[in-house]
């Protein structure tokens, strides 16, 4: 399996905390020694990870112009979670699982933000279609601020078939759509649940919507007709978290 480049302070720190054995080496910007870099260096040394320094131009090149914050890591790519393995995990879950399904999100910043919200809300996985959707790019990992290392990420070949598998595992499928008959806070989100969000601009595909048990919308009281998909995702996930609170 090939190596990946991960950059940004939060993303690299999350790697050191969750998968230190997978980190080949960490490259630091020469001449930078602020507090956060110093703390990261100490953590890397505790984990016996190789450190090197390079001119900022090299980090700019390796991160393809991304905001690397003076640090990047070369890391062994994590083996993606297989969809069948996820279904097995869900079937054996000891408490009602929460899964986020993104139907065709293509902006890496949106996917990164969705991963971060999923982590905060306690989702057990984020699922996307393999085609016509963004995967775990370095930009996604940077925006996710470590969540890409903590939330299992699953790419599926056939999303409709996967949704049927979620139903067989006992999950209630709730999709978000501007034309839904009820608001998200009017739905029961307490049990085993998959939240389905559509792509930027186009929303859920027809076949995806047909596999939802219920469709909800967000209240929009201003002049705009919809929210950014990552913002909408956070709202729905945290409503589920609120309902699940003891």
Image (cartoon, grey):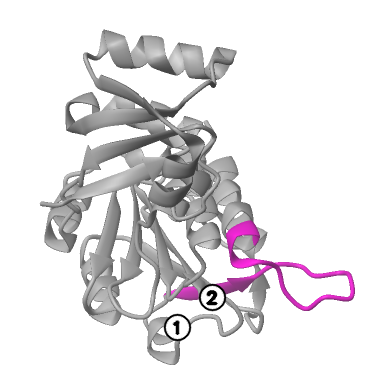
- Per the image, label 1 sits on a secondary structure element best described as helix
Q: Main secondary structure of the magenta part?
A: loop
Q: Would you say residue 55 is visible in this rendering?
A: yes
Q: Would you say residue 151 is visible in this rendering?
A: no
Does the magenta portion include 225?
yes
Which residue corresponds to mark 1? 209
Q: Nearer the viewer, mark 1 or mark 2?
A: 1
**Depth check: 116 or 238 in front?**
116
Q: Which residues are magenta?
A: 213-231
Image location of residue 1, percent across then percent down: 10, 52
- Per the image, label 2 sits on a secondary structure element best described as strand
Image location of residue 56, percent across then percent down: 50, 37
Q: Residues within 10 Å of mark 1 (few under 14, many from 20)?
A: many
Residue 70 placement, left or right of 236: left
**Which of the 4 image quarters holds residue 33?**
top right
Identify the residue shown where x is 56% and y is 85%.
202
Does the magenta portion include 7?
no
Image location of residue 238, percent across then percent down: 59, 47
Marks 1 and 2: CB-CB under 8 Å?
yes
Tally the marks.
2
Identify the residue shown where x is 63% and y is 54%.
235
**In this rendering, is residue 214 above or below 245?**
below
Residue 177 placement, left or right of 129: right
Task: State which tag comes first along the sequence, 1 or 2.
Answer: 1
Q: Which mark is residue 20?
A: none
**Depth check: 100 or 211 in front?**
100
3D distance between C-alphas at marks 1 and 2:
8 Å
Which residue corresponds to mark 2? 215
């Amino acid at each position: 399996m090939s190596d990946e480049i991960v950059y940004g302070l939060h993303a690299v720190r999350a790697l050191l905390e969750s998968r230190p054995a997978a980190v080949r080496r960490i490259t630091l910007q020469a001449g930078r020694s602020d507090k956060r870099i110093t703390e990261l260096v100490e953590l890397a040394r505790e984990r016996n990870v190789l450190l090197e320094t390079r001119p900022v131009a090299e980090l700019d090149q390796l991160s393809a112009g991304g905001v690397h914050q003076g640090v990047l890591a070369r890391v062994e790519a994590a083996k993606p979670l297989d969809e069948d393995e996820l279904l097995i995990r869900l079937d054996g879950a000891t408490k009602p699982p929460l899964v986020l399904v993104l139907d065709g999100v293509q902006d890496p910043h949106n996917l990164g933000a969705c991963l971060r919200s999923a982590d905060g809300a306690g989702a057990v996985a984020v699922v996307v279609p393999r085609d016509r959707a963004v995967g775990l790019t370095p930009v996604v990992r940077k925006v996710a601020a470590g969540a890409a290392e903590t939330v299992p990420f699953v790419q599926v070949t056939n999303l409709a078939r996967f949704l049927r598998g979620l139903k067989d595992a006992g999950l209630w499928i709730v999709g978000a759509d501007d034309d839904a008959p009820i608001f998200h806070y009017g739905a029961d989100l307490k049990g085993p649940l998959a939240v389905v969000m559509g792509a930027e601009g186009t929303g859920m595909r027809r076949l995806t919507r047909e596999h939802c048990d219920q469709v909800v919308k967000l209240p929009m009281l201003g002049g705009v007709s919809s929210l950014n998909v990552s913002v909408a995702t956070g709202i729905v996930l945290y409503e589920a978290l609120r309902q699940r609170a003891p």
